[in-house]
Structures are given as structure tokens and as C-alpha cells.
Image: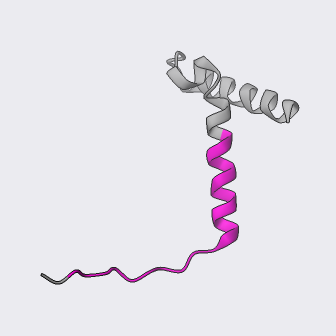
Amino acid sequence: MAVFETPRTPWHWGYYRLRHRVENFFQRIKRFRRVGARYEKLALHFLSFVQLAAILDSLSS
């Protein structure tokens, strides 16, 4: 039985670094329970709390 290997696609280090930073940011703001569980039903209220969590995260780091 032959094993087929998919061709490797090149990737850019800068994109990988940026993606890693964004993923880490979302993990940090999910520590806020309201963001992780999405208690807010209205999108505007949820966005407001995400922005507040982002501000608090930027102040703490």
C-alpha cells in the first residue's frame, strides 16, 4: 500500500508570529468569565465587554 505525502506549503514567520500573538490575546481575555461564557446576549454589549477586557489586558502587560 502506497503512502501519499502531501506537498509542504511554504509559510511566513511573520504571519505565524502574528497569529500566535492573536491566539494568546484571546486566551487571556477568555479569563474574563463574561467573555468566555458569553453571558451578554446583545452583540453590542458583548463587544463592549470584549473591548473593556482588551483595555484591561493591555494595561496589565
Q: With respect to residue 44, does 9 lie above or below?
A: below
Quadrant hosting residue 20 = bottom right
Quadrant hosting residue 35 = top right
Image x and y of residue 34, in percent: 59, 18
Image x and y of residue 32, in percent: 65, 21
Image x and y of residue 27, in percent: 62, 36
Q: With respect to residue 37, does 58 lie above or below?
A: below
Q: At 66% from the left edge and 48% from the top edge, which residue is drawn?
A: 22
Q: Nearer the viewer, residue 23 or 4?
A: 4
Q: With respect to residue 60, does 8 lie above or below?
A: below
Q: At 47% from the left edge and 79% from the top edge, which residue is drawn?
A: 9
Left or right: 3 in relation to 38: left
Q: Nearer the viewer, residue 58 or 61?
A: 61
Q: With respect to residue 51, does 4 lie above or below?
A: below
Determine if the magenta segment contains residue 15: yes
Q: At 34% from the left edge and 79% from the top edge, which residue is drawn?
A: 6
Q: Quadrant of the N terminus?
A: bottom left
Q: Count the numbered circles shown.
A: 0
Where are the magenta residues, as a range?
A: 3-25
Left or right: 4 in relation to 32: left
Quadrant hosting residue 15 = bottom right
Identify the residue at the far left of this view. Answer: 1
Q: Quadrant of the C terminus?
A: top right
Image x and y of residue 58, in percent: 83, 35
